[in-house]
Amino acid sequence: MTLLGPISLHGGHSGEFCCHAQDSLADILERYLQRGFKQVGITEHIPPVHARFLYPEEIEQGLTVDHLYQRFAAYFKTLRQLKADMADRIHIFAGMETEAFTGYLPHVRHLVEAFSPDYIVGSVHHVADICFDYSLITYEAAARACGSVDDLYMAYFDRQFEMIDAVRPFVVGHFDLVRIHDPHYRERVVQPKIAAKIDRNLDLIKDLNLVMDLNLRPLARGEAEPYPTRFILEKIQSRQIPMVPGDDSHGVAQAGNHVDAGIRLLENMGFETRWPVPRRLEMK
């Protein structure tokens, strides 16, 4: 079975359940309906495993690890109710997006057992336990912790390989997010030592029959191309790894944005645009 038409399998973050998002989850889902979506995956971030992984805005709001766990439980309860209520209008896949900080593997296993998501988006936002995509300041801090920007890339792809192998996420999220604050990323990803790690990770994704996220968030920021960059997209296409759009939306105004452009890009590159049905795979 496959799915047809506009889709996003990464995003739907809402102000109810994510401090850096806006709007209610119900309103975001209504926006997808208005834009003609017949199916969508919602993938809220998992809660932190330790207080040192709280974001500044969470600390400012006085939230704790326990608060965020309870909010995550409320997310699944709310999403499943909306899934039932809207079943005759849209097929909703109830997912979650991983982190990859110290202690994440037993934490993800627990969350899977506790909440039984329909599928998982496997993402890496931390290197050296620093959330490198939060700001340019944290990006530079992560690069210093690794030794250089090149070393940051190497460490990122190593952690991503570990996450993919252990978590077996249905969707591998924003594959080259590590480029987020690097104006020279096109030159960097072709460096032999970095390209070798990219090839290794893509080979693992292919071997495990996983799906990759055509993450459209950069287009919403006015950048030239989505994640991953064209050099990596060509490697993915040559391996015939499925790619599915993800708007990585954080509010009503972003829901479904650039999905049509993403589908055209995939079609022009020869990717299949009959989408695989999300499912949960067994962790290693």
Image (cartoon, rainbow, N blue to C red):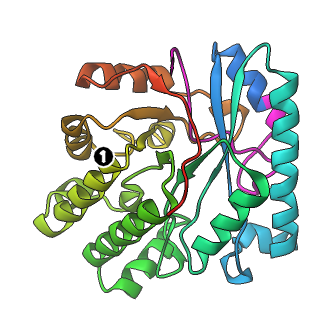
Q: Residue at x 75, y 31 (%)?
A: 28
Q: Give x and y (percent) for residue 155.
A: 35, 75
Q: Position of residue 185 (x, y in %)?
A: 26, 57
Question: Could you say where residue 54 lies in the image, as x and y percent from the top left?
Answer: 71, 74
Give the class, few, some or many, for how many residues have Cα within 10 Å of label 1's Cα (few <14, many ≥20). some
Name the residue located 56 percent from the left edge and 81 percent from the top edge: 102
Above or below, 232 relative to 50: above
- Labels in figure, total: 1
Is residue 105 in sight in this rendering?
A: yes
Question: Label 1 is placed on what type of residue?
Answer: Lys
The residue beneath circle 1 is: 206
Question: What span is colored magenta in the figure?
Answer: 1-27
Residue at point 51%, 20% (across, down): 1
Q: Is residue 154 above or below residue 215?
A: below
Q: Residue 16: in sight, yes or no?
A: no
Magenta-span inclusion, residue 201:
no
- On the rendered structure, is 12 left or right of 211? right
In the depicted structure, whether residue 284 falls above or below residue 211 = below
Q: Which residue ends up furthest to the left in the rendered image?
A: 192
Q: Nearer the viewer, residue 172 or 29?
A: 172
- The residue at the point 70 percent across, 76 percent down is 49
Q: Is residue 234 left or right of residue 246?
A: left
Query: What's the magenta bit mostly, secondary-structure-wise?
Result: loop
Camera-nearest residue between 2 and 217: 2
